[in-house]
Amino acid sequence: MSSVITVSALERRLNASIPQQAIRGEVAARLKKIGRTAKISGFRPGKIPAKILEQHYGAQAHQEAFGDALQRSFAEAVQLNNLRVAGYPQFEVKTNDPNADLIEYSATFEVYPEVQIGDLSGVAMEHLVYELAQADVDSTVMTLRKQRAVFETADRAAQADDQVLVDFTGKLNGEVFQGGEAKNYSFVLGAGRMLPEFEVALTGMKAGETKSFDMTFPADYHGKDVAGKQVTFTIALHKVEAPKLPEVDASFAEVVGIEGGDVSKLESEIRSSLQHEVARRLKARNKEAAMEALLKVSSFAVPKALVEWEAQSLMQKTAQDMESRGMKMEGLSISPEFFAERAERRVKLGLILADLAQKQGLKARPEQVRALVEDYAQSFDQPEDVVRWVYANASQLQEVENLVMEENIVAWTMAQAKTADKAISFNELMGN
């Protein structure tokens, strides 16, 4: 027999017992199995008396048998009481006498919540849209040209896109601050390597000129000593170099990845690439909006155990990512608590998506999965091979199915809410 007590919103305590006879029978079976291969001085394997085996291996066999019996008893009680356990239970043996006819125990654990998704009909949502324009293609070609520019000395004032060579000294309260001084420092105006005020001060200067000016660092500047403070810079400009852009010819086309340098293919390849990127970014932005809407109307407790697991996973992934970027993690501690808020959000969304997929019939359909796989495969030289590889790889196929399910849920969410299309600019979409 078993009984379940509600401790809190999601926490439960199960009280149950295990018949001693079941454990004794399992101990005997284990000792018999151990006796076939056990090596004890003075005895041949398989010929060791039961009493001797009990002396040497009895405690081990009893511990293993009781552990297995405990897990079986818990699983049976959980099924009998129709409980959905989240995380691992904490067991406590209540019976002090190991030879008692019944070994009573309790198990404390969390259960999955009843997911409650509220009414979306009153939620205002924006469905971002964008139509690729010729100007976007032209702008991308120009960006590619600028990235491959060569610089030539210019006898004129510095302007945007020029490369300049400078000495500079920055002082805070009359003293040079850390990182505030450099000699023969080269950078491109407008590339974002220097603060806007610094670049504005340089614009219009000619080689050989010197200028002093005051500027205030942003409050969130990474250098804490000068963040939010006014400093005085002195700049000496040594050289101004103007960019010389490459012509859009076969050589340029080949450099940017067009096989054979076919200039006629350059624009179509760029357009196709931009269309895929625009679609990807729109999908990501609209998905994020749908997820936020679902979180906004959903109210239920989240199992702490799942949040802790997710926080640990995020911490490990972050550490691995930092190591892959060349950072040494030795001596650097990252606490899982740092990821707690993000972990709770991810767990809650996971529960919401699983609930919607089940109750609203939004799971991925085979034809949807096939269409997404084939679309993905088109970016490779041998699409058929990629399709076969995805379908032969269970984990990859599961990822595709999850993506399709998420797309179905985004479409369902926007259909339920007060959704209106909103045009977004190319630069905003691309994060420029």
Image: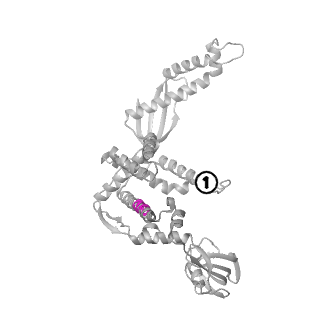
Q: Quadrant of residue 32?
A: top right
Q: In this picture, is 35 found above or below 205?
A: above
Instruction: Locate residue 328 relative to residue 191 in the image: left or right.
Output: right
Q: Quick one: label 1, few (<14), some, or many (20+) residues within 10 Å? A: few
Residue 273 painted magenta: yes
Residue shown at 41% from the left, 37% from the top = 4
Q: Nearer the viewer, residue 19 or 33?
A: 33
Q: Nearer the viewer, residue 398 or 335?
A: 398
Rendered-image quadrant of the N terminus: top left
Q: Quadrant of residue 156?
A: bottom right
Residue 77 painted magenta: no
Residue shown at 66% from the left, 82% from the top = 239
Relative image position of residue 324 (x, y in whole percent): 61, 54
Instruction: Locate residue 359 relative to residue 219 in the image: left or right.
Output: left
Three-letter amino acid code at the position of disc 1 = Ser
Relative image position of residue 83 (x, y in whole percent): 39, 38
Prevalent SS, magenta region: helix
Magenta extent: 272-281
Instruction: Locate residue 256 relative to residue 127 in the image: left or right.
Output: right
Relative image position of residue 118 (x, y in whole percent): 31, 56
Q: Is residue 181 visible?
A: no
Residue where numbered disc 1 is placed: 324
Relative image position of residue 107 (x, y in whole percent): 48, 37
Q: How many marks?
A: 1
Q: Is residue 121 visible?
A: yes
Q: Considering the numbered disc 1 on the image, is that residue within a helix, a strand or a loop? A: helix
Q: In this picture, is 247 found above or below 49?
A: below
Q: In this picture, is 25 found above or below 319?
A: above
Q: Quadrant of residue 122?
A: bottom left
